Image (cartoon, grey):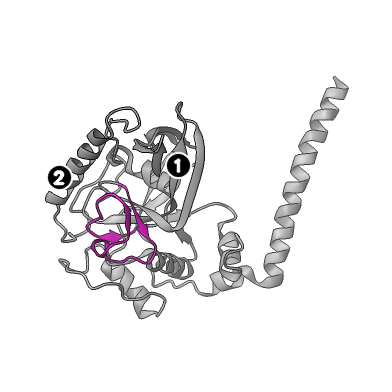
Amino acid sequence: MRDRRHKNSVSVFSVAVPALLLVAIGGVLSAKVGLLDDLDATVDTRIEAPVTVTIEPRRMEYRAEGHFIKNGFAVDAPLVDATLAKPFRIMKYQVSRTDFQRCVEDGACEKGEPAASLGNDTPMTGVNYTDASNYAAWLTEKTGQVWRLPTDRQWAFAAGRKFPDDALGIDGSKDNPALRWLADYERESARQKSKNPMPQPSGTFGENEFGVADLDGNVWEWTQTCHRRVTIGVDGEVLKISQACGIYVVDGKHRASMSFFIRDPKSGGCAVGVPPDNLGFRLVRDDRWYADMLYAFERRFPGAV
């Protein structure tokens, strides 16, 4: 019994001490290079933090992101049985034109593409991945809270029942490939016919079961998830993954993948499927205990993480 207690104490000690040392070293390094000074010094009490919704832990099944190929033919993406282990906060509404204009006035964001809208309470559209990232950095510095674009996985959990399932139910590698092509053509044609591209005031399209608004409106949202092409085997095993970071997943009424520099999706740059009506975004708040230090490190040493 004594030996067992001794082994357990040694095991706990061996894990706890390195963890404490890492925290201590991180704090010392942060103080040495002034990583956290920039974030603390720029907090602007005039800028209110956005209204957020907390997405609680749960399990969810949804289609994996990416273009899946089997035997040289396109197939439906597999269903993913995912578990959200910790809660996260996401903006209730998409970033509005008024919110984005403050960033432009501060010189931290570009104006973006001119877009017809019904006023300043409409979502900011005509923005690319870089514009959205710049706004996230500006909001982080103004509020002292770390804001980021969501991952596709986070967006799926936030969307809940409004997350689209783009499966056709036709396996092009087994069935007649023309059947899948025709089904895909009919679906994309229907999507084009139902378009109403004018951005509407925030809240127009209602809320989902968690209180997140406008998830299935006519503004698609940038994520930080890179587009990928996945080759799978006969039994669904992954044979090869080709990732294109420079093309990002955008989520809305259906998934699409857009080149990072595209502001107007109708002008081109959609890697898969019908282009979205408009490109906008909402952000998640990074509440991890080390978020401030990680953010400051990323800003001081771009590309290091």
Give me the residue at 35% from left, 65% from top: 128
Amino acid on which disc 2 is placed = Ala
In terms of depth relative to the viewer, which is nearer, 262 or 220? 262
Quick one: label 1 or label 2, which is nearer the N terminus? Answer: 2
Question: Is 111 covered by the magenta stretch?
Answer: no
**Identity of the residue furthest to the right in this view:** 3
Q: Which residue is mark 2?
A: 190
SS state under label 1: strand
Check residue 230 in the rendering and tell me which mark sits there, or answer none. Answer: 1
User: Residue 49 appears in which quarter of the rendering?
Assistant: bottom left
User: Residue 103 appears in which quarter of the rendering?
Assistant: bottom left
In terms of depth relative to the viewer, which is nearer, 43 or 291? 291
Quarter that holds the N terminus = top right
Quarter that holds the C terminus = bottom right
The CA distance from mark 1 to mark 2 is 27 Å
Check residue 4 in the rendering and tell me which mark sits there, or answer none. Answer: none
User: Along the horizontal axis of the image, is 182 left or right of 223?
Assistant: left
Q: Is residue 7 visible?
A: yes
Q: Residue 268 placed where, x, y %?
A: 28, 62
Question: Is 265 covered by the magenta stretch?
Answer: yes
Give me the residue at 32% from left, 70% from top: 100
Amino acid on which disc 1 is placed = Val
Q: Which residues are magenta?
A: 255-282
In terms of depth relative to the viewer, which is nearer, 214 or 229? 229
